[in-house]
Amino acid sequence: MSQASAALPIASGRETAREVWRLSRGHRLRLATVGVLGIVSTAVNVIPPVIIGFLVDRVRAGTADLGTVAMVTAAMVGSAALGAAGTAMTIVLATRVYHTILAGLREQLVSRAMTLPQHLVERAGTGDLISRTSDDVTAVADAAPSVIPALTVTAFTIVVSLGGLAALEWPYAVAFAVVLPVYVLVMRWYLRIGPRVYGAERAAMSARAQQILESQRGYATVLGLGLTEQRHRSVLAASWGVAVWTLRARAVGVMLNLRLNFGECLSLATVLVVGFVLIDADVSTVGAATAAMLLVLRLLGPINELVFVVDDLQSALASLSRMIGVVTIPEEAGEPSATVDAGVAVRLNGVAFRYGDGPRLFDNLTLDIPTGQRTAVVGASGAGKTTLAAVIAGIHLPEDGTVAQPGRTTLITQETHVFVGTLRDNLTLGAPTAGDDDVHAALDATGAAGLLDLLPDGLNTIVGTGGHPLTDAQAQQLALTRLLLADPELAILDEATAEAGSTHAGLLDRAADAVLHGRTGLVIAHRLSQAATCDRIVVMEQGRIIESGTHNELVAAGGVYGGLWSAWEAGRSTNNTVIDKQENKEF
Amino acid sequence: MPPSIPPPDREELSRLGRGPLTRWLPLILQAPADPPDVQPFAADPETTAGRFLLRVILSVRRVTVPAALAATLWQVGEAGVPVVMGLAIDRALATGDVGQLVLWIGVLVGLYVVLTAAAKFAIQLTAYAIQLLQHRLRSTLSTGVLHPVAGGAHAPDGGVVSLMTNDVGRMSNGVQLVIMPIARVVTISFIAVSLLTTHWILGLAVLVGAPVAVWLMGVLSERLSRDTREYQGLLATTVGMATDVVAGYRVVKGIRAETEATRRYRQASQETLVGAKRNAGLLGRFLMGSGVVTGVFVAAVMGLAGWFAVDGQLSIGELIAAVGLAQALLPQIRSIANDSIPNLAGSRASSARILDALQADVAVAPEPDDAVSPVLPQLPVLEVSTPSTTIRIEPGELVGVRTDDVTAARVAEALLDPRESGGEVAVRLDGIAAGELTAREYRSRVTFSPHRVTLFSGTIRDNLTVTAAAPELVTAAVRAAACDDFAADLDLPVGEDGNRFSGGQLQRLALARALASDAPVLVLHDPTTAVDSVTEHTIAERLRAVRAGRSTLLITSSPALLSSCDRVVDLLEDAPVRVGRSS
């Protein structure tokens, strides 16, 4: 939110209109039908007031009999049924087209979100993208019940009723048209303040949800650090924050109601005055005045509705332009892959890199990773290990220099994510064609087969948010199995086995071993025991490669790595035997 | 996050929608800046959902009774509009009497003034009642479920968020049931009585017809709202899936599964589309049905009135008024059927869910309040007994414990909430079982920093000072936890769930927060698993100094951390606890 320049783009009004028009392809005939049906059915809805006016005049003239009454009643029932059917059909058809277009758009949105260059998303924060694929999609979908009738039936009703008034006696329509500017002013006033107050109310609501969520997620922290009282007060303060904004929003709503009532009263008084003059001049009848009054009464509802709907419509349009803003991000032309000699899987040549406008992290970095070997990268936090992994994986593009990597390169990091769905769905994400046999084989290879016994429905167990909970270590084991199934040429593991911390380290190390078996591997390690088993070790410091060689070479050389290794050994020696023991444990 | 809209500026805010002509109008019932003190609602095991709802709704009678009166005046006023118009046409337009015209326009204006003022009170009072109830219910759930002082029966799951937002909102909306439906029923009766005085058959038609129409439309809307909930569930699933896929975006990218993830989303999206189309069909049936019901109803009243007018039993003015009244009935009928009935169902369902959560928690043993509160020294001896051994931490000691994950989790659980642990691990302070102490006493001695890091929204400083009594403690803690390299500016916001920081940085911040508490006894559970070995060494070197003079228990298997301890209790070596199977 703070860096506006980094946020994902938002489509302009023109781009949004163009994209919506493009999306409507294939539905335009149906949309035209909606228009025709809408006009016809609203026209039918104008009939009852006119009939009542007719009856009033006949009764006054004394020319009405029971036959007239029966005919008039039948006409009213008929027009009510016809009008209701027409209106229903209009709305059903329009709603279906609306949702079909929305479904197409949200699918394009997610598809585009998945193929966006990662640096763009990292800069904007995944939160922005999540908000567009969830909040905005929901906002547009939820607007349907109010926006669709407004755009079809209500808008037509106003036009047709004005026509009806004009048909009765044109001065009625003119009188009403004179009042319309009042509504325009009311709407303009409302749009100035309404959305802001409601926006502030919604922001207070998300702050409230966030406070509750934090207390829930941090239950152990709250209890363990004795923060119960404090958190209770924070939640209540956020809760009351919403109350403050809601009551302010209601106050604005009340003022809107007051202005609309003023418009209504003015319209009705105008009808009375115009009717009085017209009847006095013998131009109009009492029946026509009655019909005009009933038509105006019927109009007031839809006009009031429109004022309210404009708010929904605006927020739906805002959401729409945020969705379309992502969909219309142009595809980046794929960089031609640099050529590599045989036997070299990855070649970095003079690579320079920085995040956005930040300081240069790499300058003229050159590195070859031989095919089929396992290379480790070690160094302190902030040395640039993770950035190097992402550049090699092709996630970050270098500012200068070239990076060549195999076509099927995969990266897994400490950040695990268990997708909502079955365990099978989670494992086959990178290998959609894998059968259950493949899945079982992969689970065996990574030593995760035992996990199946712990889950109630085996591969069919629903995991992820709201599903069967998995520990961090289990999630990481799942990620490694997923990677094995995806069967990449180059596998990059960025501290992928770090989280387990204590006893699971050995287990995950073996899983990682299985994943790397028979392919080129790059391991970003923070436990040196992991690095020691690799074919080659690269030591980084402040974005530079300062040492590289085999474990034995580097230890013998007594450089930075040698120093790290002896510190590690010193800490480890006291508990050596135990470390070996714990590797036999499973969870 | 909702689309960002600039909040209203102060001047606009002070007016809250009042323009140059309406500036003099009073602002009523605005919320005070500070939350009011509220008592939690009682939820005994015998309470049923319906009774609980009733208790909640009736708890704000000082607001709802005036609100119902104002709402009645408002709705009767709305129904009076067509009547006044009919009378004006009859008395002024049909006669050509200017005096009558002025009189009736005056009546119309007066009616609008009254009904607008009544609406203002009704709307504002109703909103106030809803907010008061929401706040009190939320407070009840906060103390009962989210922040139980004594520790809950179990940690609340993610459902508590929905419970404290959606369900609290829906249940509080139930208070409208003692406001609007009352006003509407009174209005319908008013219309019926007006028609009765015009012609008894017309009145009877409304008295019989209105309930039938409400019932018919209720039946029609019931099927629709059931399907709408189903469709909304589908939509929520699809939206949830998009959130999930985007949240796991890096993982998807990492294994190049973009196409497959998109394909799966498309499948869910299309299922939702089918649901949306079916829902639109039902909406159409409802619109068609309710249009016919109301149309036939008005036509019937009008036909009857026309018949009586032809017969000479009704004047023209009465005929117009009758038609106007019949029109005024429609919104009343529609609202009862479409708003009040679903509201009742929704608030009852939410009441049941909230009650469930509260009653589940009532089952927890109460605090040992018969207070023979034992006198504990400020720095007691901590003893943790597992089935195989007892770990004893003397005042001022730094003790490390190495164990398998399952035992570590049990020990951690027992130290976090000794009153709730299953009993396999016992915690004692100076020989007194922790379960016999009040939660407050226990926590004033023992602070537990869990392995899983949670930062709260706000700045780094906000997070570090939640436990710290003095600012210099924060500075010392930041250095001891080796946060000085990235947390030089303590006023940096931590971001949602601390997403501004890497896993290792988060762990260091959590460690700094725990150290800043300067607790007499501090328990740290795997505090550095995501921290690189160089930094871990630095932390191990600084830990002793910052905890000097106070007791610390480290549950960890990090060699670096263990090497800094006074003593290491190695449960793996002494008594291997075997859980699961060996591979």
Image (cartoon, coloured by chain):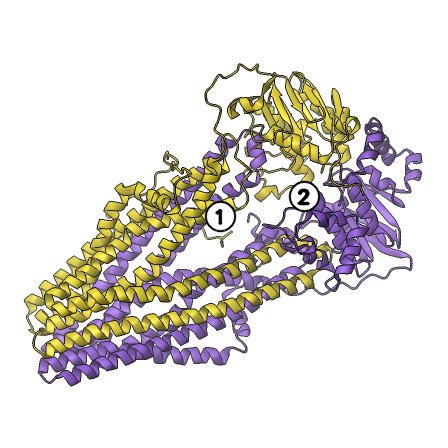
Image position of B508 with respect to A183: above or below: above
Rendered residue at 37%/67% (across/down):
B220
The location of residue A312, given as percent across then percent down, is 42, 61
| Residue A567 seen in this snapshot | no
Mark linked to residue A361: none
- Chain shown in yellow: B
Q: Colour of chain A?
A: purple
Q: Chain of mark 1?
A: B
Are tags 1 and 2 found on a single chain? Answer: no
Residue under numbered circle 2: A471
Q: Secondary structure at mark 1?
A: helix
Image position of A548 with respect to A9: above or below: above
Q: Nearer the viewer, residue A224 or B256?
A: A224
Q: Chain of mark 2?
A: A
Which residue ends up furthest to the front in the rendered image? B46
Residue under numbered circle 1: B162
The kind of residue tagged 1 is: Ser
Q: Quadrant of residue B329?
A: bottom left
The location of residue B369, given as percent across then percent down, is 46, 23
The kind of residue tagged 2 is: Thr
Q: Quadrant of residue A33?
A: bottom left
Q: Give neighbour class at mark 2: few <14, some 14-19, many 20+ (Cα, 10 Å).
A: few
The location of residue A554, given as percent across then percent down, is 90, 38
The location of residue B401, given as percent across then percent down, is 72, 27
Tally the numbered discs: 2
Would residue A326 be found to the left or right of residue A510 on screen? Answer: left
Rendered residue at 33%/66% (across/down):
B217
Q: Kindly report the distance in space between the C-alpha atoms of the residues bearing marks 1 and 2.
A: 24 Å
